[in-house]
Image (cartoon, helix red, strand yellow):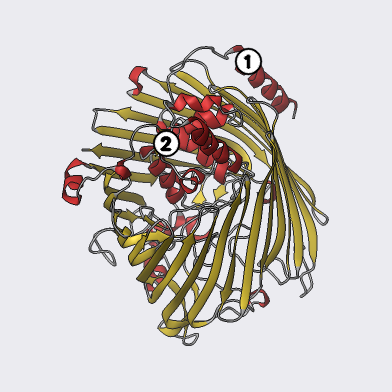
Amino acid sequence: MRVFISYGCLVIWLCIMHEVSGQIRKDKDEKIIAELMERFIENQEANLDYTDLQEQLEFYMKNKLNLNEATRAELEKLFFVSEKQVNAILKHRSLFGNFITVFELQTIDVLDELSLYYLSYFVTVDEDLMTDRTRFYEMSIKGKHELIALHENEFEQRAGYDEGLKTAGKNDYAGSPYRHVLRYRFGYGSRLSYGYTAEKDMGEQFFNGAQKNGFDFNSLHFLYRPSRGLIKTVAIGDYQANFGQGLVFGSGIAARKSAFVMSVKRNFQALRPYRSLNENEFLRGAAFTMGNKKWELTSFISHKYISTNFRTANDTTDEPSEEFSSIQISGLHRTASEILNRYNVLQTIYGSHLAWKFSSYQIGFTALQTLYDKPFIKGEKPYQLYNFSGNSLTNLGMDFNFQLRNLNWFGEIGRSDNNGWAINSAMMIPLDERLDLLLLYRNYDKNYQTTYNNPFGENSDGRNEEGIYTGVSVKFSRKWLFNTYFDWYNSPWLRYLTDAPSRGHDYLGELQYNPSKNTQLYIRFRYENKWRNQPNNIIRIDFTTPTTRNLYRLHIQYKISNTWSGKSRVEFSQYHDPITGFEEGALIFQDIQYNTPYKKLTVTSRVAFFSIDNYNARIYATENDVLYQYAVPMFQNSGVRYFLMANMNITKKLEAWIKYSITAYQNTKTISSGLEQINGNSISDLRVQIRYVF
């Protein structure tokens, strides 16, 4: 413990000693996106594909908002900007006319140092490409092409690749232990985008066996936004759709609770191209948006095959019956059983969203239906009692957004055809120039059912939950900021690993100090209280007990010069269960980044030491990765993790990345289990990626 505390004090001292005054060259776009992603998703403790969220940030960075043209809705899409800050930017433009330069934002008092820094990457005073009148065929000439190829492999062999399994007639991985990704994209600003994305996961076959044509996952997209006329957007192929607050329908991933305590409002574009690698959370078909300044209609249809788990007809045959019990979301098709269940059910979704827009409010209505060509049969566990079953599901909803001066009230009401209801409603209240308050109430029935949704909540399924979330942001000055939230929730019915109605609450408090755009420091405390099944129950009935988890973090990032920068963190975790007692963990890491002049080469490295009792006291920490990939490793047990990554601009058109990482454990002789097991105490990974832009 003394070592970690001493290290924290040393890092603070180094940060102060190396604070540099004057102008320092701007950071690379990828670094800014990585920082924002880390703050936004770090509380989502799951190994998900965050590419979609990352690409939204990249889209806004490449297609900067024109401060002199941007609407409220467009500014709100930048989730790191609060409602009060949006109001202040619009008010400044109304009072003083058009912005002459981006640096004029510094005259707006409510914009703190860090918000100004991030905004400089996403806004401009130049003309937006959406305002030009370039014709379609001219865009296809003037736009940019991007070609990306990624290779990844692990150096240790997992049990699934043992050839003895196949000889013995057991399940094994049919393919090679390599991962390949291929991406092609064309884009002209925010108006035209088309491309192709393909992926082969580790263990999947490639140009042989079940994949004689190559990649396991293939995706094509086309999206066009005309500059004039009634049609606003046309999407063909794979795309994303989001309406309202994601309660009735929202494909893709949306962040939940985070250090951006005021950022709970969903501000997605209604339609956007799909360029991610998640093989489930997207639509495949066609969609359009049409309208004018007073109304907007979006209609869509999706028709795609999904991978499911079939129920077998009896215990003596492997032939699938005409029903399925769950949808596979991993996207992995490595073993004979995974290949058998690949793309075996046809899912059709169609619907519309109609919105009326007025000067101070907007009201929208959503209607959609989901169809399956085989019936979905819910599980037999008690917590699955209210799950969806059948061939079709209909959803209806209404969303609203009212703006009264600085006060913003928004929300959504949804209903499924089994009479399940859901509602969320939030209000952002600026109490003072330096104090913001957010209140959000949600009540999702235990029998509320949807196909794709991403509303705000403790759980990701948007049902069986009632709660009240309170967020508070206090700006002491441009350099000091305190963010905090408290969330109370309960589940009136059972949940996975919780065999009784349950309740919980969590709290986060973060004090930020941003002396300049080159140095940021924050101290964070997070507390969680949840009811779970008692461990080691010896009777048939699972009793539940309250568990608590505390996380303490000190984080500093600093820029020493134009070429050197660093990031340091110390984090402690503490888990308590009335039966097993206390379990603890600690993580300490140091990042160093070096940029050569003109940023021809960027080298990033990390060393992380961790000592964690077990999974309950786990700690997550995001880390830099190659473009369009995101790593959020979970730390448990004891050991050390290193990574070294180089990003090289070989020519103006050709760029390359290479990343090597290794985790070595001190207190275990095997890693993972089943077909994923590694006999040894270390695991290492290599990623090589090239990008050609022309």
- Quarter of image, res 496: bottom right
Q: Residue at x 83, y 55 (%)?
A: 578
Q: Against 60, is 271 above or below?
A: below
Residue in front for this viewpoint, 417 or 202: 417
Q: Is residue 689 left or right of residue 554?
A: left
User: Does the residue at mark 1 contact the one at mark 2 (Cβ under 8 Å)?
Assistant: no
- Badge 2 marks a residue whose secondary structure is loop
Query: Residue 236: x percent and y percent?
Result: 29, 62
- Quarter of image, res 2: top right
- Badge 1 marks a residue whose secondary structure is helix
Q: On the image, numbered disc 2 is attached to which residue?
A: 68
Q: On the image, numbered disc 1 is attached to which residue?
A: 16
Q: Amino acid at mark 2?
A: Asn
- Quarter of image, res 536: bottom right
| Quarter that holds the C terminus | top left
Residue at the outermost right position = 578
How many discs mark residues in the rendered view? 2
Q: Amino acid at mark 1?
A: Ile
Q: In the rendering, which numbered label is found on residue 573?
A: none
Determine if residue 531 is in view: no
Q: Residue at x 36, y 56 (%)?
A: 274
In the image, which is nearer the foreground, mark 1 or mark 2? Answer: 2
Determine if residue 523 is in view: yes
Query: Residue 1: x percent and y percent?
Result: 74, 30
